[in-house]
Amino acid sequence: MRRRKACAGSTTLAATLALLLVALTFITVYLFVTKKWWFPPAITSFGHEVDAQFFRTLIITGIVFVASQLGLAYAVFRFRDQGQKAKYSEGNQTMEVLWTGATIVLFVGLGIMARSAWAEVHFRPASPGALQVEVTGQQFAWNFRYAGPDGKFGRLKPELVNASGGNPLGLDPADPDGKDDVVVPVMAVPVNREVELLLRSQDVTHAFFVRELRLKQDTVPGMLIRVHFTATETGTYEIPCAELCGLGHYRMHSTLTVMNDADFQKWLKEQAAANQ
Ligand SMILES: [Cu+2]
C-alpha cells in the first residue's frame, strides 16, 4: 500500500494557524495586563474584596488560558498532516484524574476565599444605625424612599399606586408614619455611613446595580431583599437596571450621589419640601 506524501501546504497552514493562536493569546494577555478596558475604581471595602477575588481568579484562569492556548498551537503544528496514519488513543487516566482534581481544588479554593465577602453583604445584617433606603423597581424607573425624621416607613397600598398622580409607590395618606416619607427618582447617601437597601419590585424582576459599589442584586416581585454597603468616596454614579425587564429596559436608570453628611441632610430636607 502506498503512503500519502507529506504536502508542503499543510505545513504552511499549520504554522499560520499556530502563529495566529500565539498572537491572539498575547493580544488577550496584553489587554488585561495594560488594563485597556477596566472597571471604574471601587468605592466600598466590599468592592476592594471583590476586585481582589477577581484578580485571583484572573491570575489562575490566565495561567491556564495561556498554557492551554500555547499547548494547542504546539499541537496544531506538531501533529500537522504529514501523510501519517491517524492513531487511536485510549486517553491517559492519570492525567484525567490530575486535571479534574486540580480543577476541583482551584474552584473550591476560590469559593472558600470569596466566602467572607459574600457573607458580608448577604448574610450579615446591616448594623442598627444604618440609613435605610427603600428601592423600588418598576417598568421602567427606579424610585427611592427615605423614612423621614420619624425613621418609619409608611404603609403602602398597591391600589393607590398612581405614578402620574405623584404617588408611584402607593403611599397610604391615612398612615401617619408615611406623612414624612420622601419618595424621589434619584438616590443620595452620606459618605462613610452604612446604608441598608430594601429592594422591591412592582412588576417584573429588575436588578439594582452600581458598578462602583460592586453591588448587583435582583429586585423580585413579592420579596423584600436587604443588602447593605458603606460608600467611602463622594461622587455621582449610575444605577442602571441590570436585568432585561421589557422593551424600555435600556432607559431604566437613575443616579446614586454620595455626599458628605451635611450636604445629604440638606438634600433630604429639600426633597422633603418638594414632596409636600
Ligand atoms: Cu428593569
Image (spheres, rainbow, N blue to C red):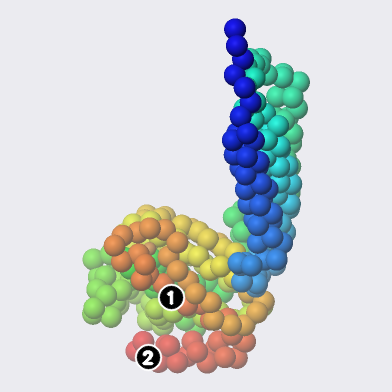
Query: Is 127 left or right of 227, judged from the image as shown?
Result: right
Amino acid residing under circle 1: Ser
- Write down which quadrant ligand 1 falls in: bottom left
The answer to whether residue 103 is above or below residue 269 is above
x then y, percent, for residue 82:
65, 26
| Mark 2 residue type | Ala
Quarter in which the C terminus is drawn: bottom left
- The residue at the point 67 percent across, 66 percent down is 35
Mark 2 Cα shell of 10 Å, populated few (<14), some (14-19), many (≥20):
few
Q: Is residue 172 left or right of residue 6?
A: left
Which numbered disc covers residue 254? 1
Q: Is residue 87 above or below residue 37?
A: above
Please name whichever residue, 70 or 149, is drawn nearer the observer in this view of the structure.
70
Name the residue: 59% across, 39% down. Answer: 13
Q: Are marks 2 and 1 in contact (CB under 8 Å)?
A: no
Q: Which sits in the foreground, 95 or 224?
A: 95
Q: Nearer the viewer, mark 2 or mark 1?
A: 1
In this picture, residue 248 sits left or right of residue 4: left
Residue at point 70%, 66% (across, down):
34
The percent coordinates of residue 137 (x first, y second) are 38, 66
For marks 2 and 1, give the CA distance.
19 Å
The answer to whether residue 198 is left or right of residue 3 is left
Q: Is residue 207 visible?
A: yes
Question: Mark 2 or mark 1, which has the lower sequence index?
Answer: 1
Residue drawn at (50%, 65%) of the image: 209
Q: Position of residue 188 (x, y in %)?
A: 51, 80
Q: Is residue 156 visible?
A: no
Q: Is residue 272 above or below residue 70?
A: below
Dot 1: few (<14), some (14–19), or many (≥20) neighbours within 10 Å?
Answer: some
Asked which secondary structure carries label 2, the reply is helix
Which quadrant is home to the N terminus? top right
> Which residue position is annotated with label 2?
274
